[in-house]
Image (tube, helix red, strand yellow):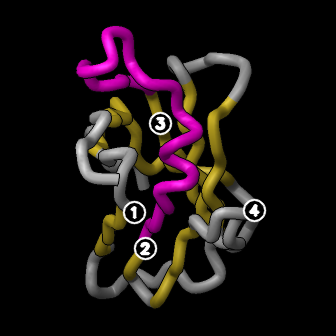
Amino acid sequence: MTCCSVDINAPRNADYQASYAFPVDYSLSGFGARLQVRDTAGAATAYFTVTTTANANLSAFVITGRYLVLTIRKEDLQLIPEATPIYDDAVLAYDIVLTDLDGIEHYFLGGAFIVPAGVTE
């Protein structure tokens, strides 16, 4: 079930949404999904977590058949500190773990989580 390394580019001044499609004969029904964003892989604290249950800012995964849709609200993206200098992109790390029907966790996807400052607020 492991896919690859894919960077996410999510500007802090807008909501972010991505959709992942699995093979036609595959169903994610009953699966769980979890994403965390941290300064680096292995860092002690996550800035936020997204699961199939919406968090306080309404960021969530939605699973429908073979599709996994990730929505991260800008309120979560704004929890990430601005880069230094401020006009640079903040570059962090993320991964997505899927939990199957037997409760086994599978690394699905990960990579750099890039947050440009943005202009429009």
Label 2 element class: strand
Q: Nearer the viewer, residue 71 or 106?
A: 71
Q: Is residue 25 above or below residue 85?
A: below
Q: Is residue 39 magenta?
A: no
In this rendering, which labeled residue sits more in front, label 4 or label 2? 2
Region rendered in magenta = 69-92
The mark nearer the N terminus, 1 or 3, is 1
Question: Residue tagged by mark 2?
Answer: 68
Indicate the position of residue 114 as horizontal and vertical percent values.
32, 33
> Could one spot residue 68 in this view of the protein?
yes
**Quarter of the image holding residue 55?**
bottom right
**Mark 3 — residue?**
94
Res 103 → quadrant: bottom right
Q: Earlier in the sequence, mark 4 or mark 3?
A: 3
Amino acid at circle 1: Asp
Expressed as whole percent of the image width and height from the top left, the position of residue 25 reads: 33, 86
Structural distance between the alpha carbons of marks 1 and 3:
17 Å
- Examine the rendered structure and indicate whether residue 24 appears above or below residue 89: below
Mark nearer the N terminus (4 vs 1): 1
The alpha-carbon separation of the residues under discs 4 and 2 comes to 18 Å
Residue 28 to residue 34: above or below: below
Closer to the chain start, of discs 4 and 2, is: 2
Assess disc 1: are there few (<14), some (14-19) or many (≥20) residues with their C-alpha within 10 Å of its C-alpha: some
Residue identified by numbered label 4: 103
* In this rendering, the label closer to the viewer, 4 or 1: 1
Question: Residue type at mark 4?
Answer: Gly
Residue behind mark 1: 15
x, y (%) of residue 3?
32, 49
Q: Nearer the viewer, mark 1 or mark 2?
A: 1
Q: Residues within 10 Å of mark 4 (few under 14, many from 20)?
A: few
Does dot 1 land on a helix, a strand or a loop? loop
